[in-house]
């Protein structure tokens, strides 16, 4: 893994002269600076956050839309769960192969042709393996599903059946082109992703599921939250006694997690418009060592730290933020209908 990271770093150094020639598209807009006073007032108006604990948790399932989400949002949780003796399994839905100019920027073979985007997906997969190794999670506890970057919502809403698969605009693939995919050759469609998640839940039976927040403004994240909720709902419908805890993490939402002028050591605060009486936000405190290892794991994503600047390092703080989710009757009924 270290050898791979050095190779990617070398490629990055050679590609730096391209930065003045390329406009890199980001998955979310750069944040606007908020006045320090406005931020302080917003923070002071928030209710006190609950202190979350992993006490009694034996099996954790982390669902990530892209390589790096599993590290920047719950990377400390993964360490804390392992330290408590719990099992941890990470499922990464896509290989992050939908960044427009990335293959050219990093000098990957194939350039902006489909082969170049597949190479980018392979690089990002290797970065996740290296990052999770830094967090203490071995490769055998990681599942890559190989679905299309920026295609998860369309698979949910339009390309549900295998007879009408989604074709990724960059790789031009309609099934996973990657080795080590959970279901090799499975068509890019909603029913296959749902089936994969359902099988993973039924096989592993996690008592804590860590998933994207349903209000995340990246379409892959919001759709991944829905798919995961459906898989849990189907498992609960089959076995009403099965009631895992669900913690939702936020990555893309307006200016979050930036708080210009506010010391990062203060930790995380949820966006004020997502704090209502209907949900509970809480923080999981991390040790100094866990924060340091999380920072080191984030550094294993050299492609993303170059493309996204300080965005990834912003998530290395003394705690991690989650919303405690519940599944209402409507979600449970949807889970039943999707399971057939």
Image: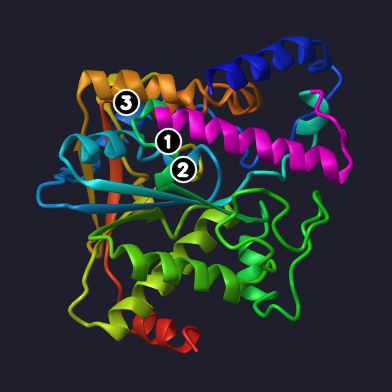
Q: Where is residue 169 shown, x and y percent of the image?
A: 81, 54
Q: Which mark is residue 71?
A: 1
Q: Earlier in the sequence, mark 1 or mark 3?
A: 1
Residue plotted at (43% across, 71% down): 198
Secondary structure found at label 1: helix
For the question of whether residue 260 can be seen, the reply is no
What's the CA distance linking mark 1 and mark 2?
Answer: 11 Å
Q: Earlier in the sequence, mark 1 or mark 2?
A: 1
Whether residue 63 is in magenta: the answer is: no
Q: Where is residue 62 shown, x and y percent of the image?
A: 38, 50
Which residues are drawn in magenta? 107-133
- Label 3 sits on residue: 317
Q: Is residue 70 left or right of residue 28?
A: left
- The majority secondary structure of the magenta stretch comes to helix
Q: Earlier in the sequence, mark 3 or mark 2?
A: 2
Tag 2: Cα neighbours inside 10 Å, few (<14), some, or many (≥20)? many
């Amino acid at each position: 893994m270290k050898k791979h990271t050095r190779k990617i770093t070398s490629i990055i150094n050679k590609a730096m002269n391209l930065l003045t020639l390329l406009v890199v598209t980001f998955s979310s807009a750069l944040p606007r600076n908020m006045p320090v006073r406005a931020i302080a007032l917003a923070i002071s108006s928030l209710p006190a956050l609950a202190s979350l604990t992993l006490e009694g948790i034996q099996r954790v399932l982390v669902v990530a839309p892209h390589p790096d989400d599993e590290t920047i949002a719950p990377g400390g949780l993964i360490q804390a769960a392992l330290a408590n003796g719990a099992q941890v399994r990470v499922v990464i839905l896509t290989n992050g192969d939908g960044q427009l100019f990335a293959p050219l920027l990093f000098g990957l073979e194939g350039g902006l042709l489909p082969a170049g985007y597949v190479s980018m997906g392979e690089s990002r997969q290797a970065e996740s393996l290296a990052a999770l190794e830094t967090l203490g999670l071995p490769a055998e506890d990681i599942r890559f599903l190989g679905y299309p970057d920026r295609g998860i919502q369309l698979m949910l809403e339009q390309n549900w059946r295998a007879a009408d698969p989604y074709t990724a605009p960059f790789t031009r693939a309609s099934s996973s082109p990657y080795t080590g995919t959970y279901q090799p050759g499975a068509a890019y469609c909603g029913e296959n992703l749902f089936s994969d998640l359902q099988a993973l839940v039924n096989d592993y039976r996690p008592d804590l599921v860590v998933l994207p927040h349903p209000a995340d403004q990246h379409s892959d994240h919001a759709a991944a939250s829905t798919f995961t909720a459906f898989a849990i709902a189907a498992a609960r419908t089959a076995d009403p006694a099965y009631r895992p805890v669900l913690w939702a993490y936020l990555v893309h939402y307006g200016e979050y997690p930036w708080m210009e002028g506010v010391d990062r050591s203060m930790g995380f605060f949820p966006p004020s418009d997502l704090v209502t009486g209907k949900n509970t936000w809480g923080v999981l405190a991390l040790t100094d060592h866990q924060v340091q290892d999380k920072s080191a794991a984030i550094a294993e994503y050299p492609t993303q730290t170059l493309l996204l600047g300080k965005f990834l390092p912003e998530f290395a703080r003394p705690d991690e933020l989650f919303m405690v989710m519940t599944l209402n009757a409507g979600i449970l009924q949807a889970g039943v209908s999707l399971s057939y």
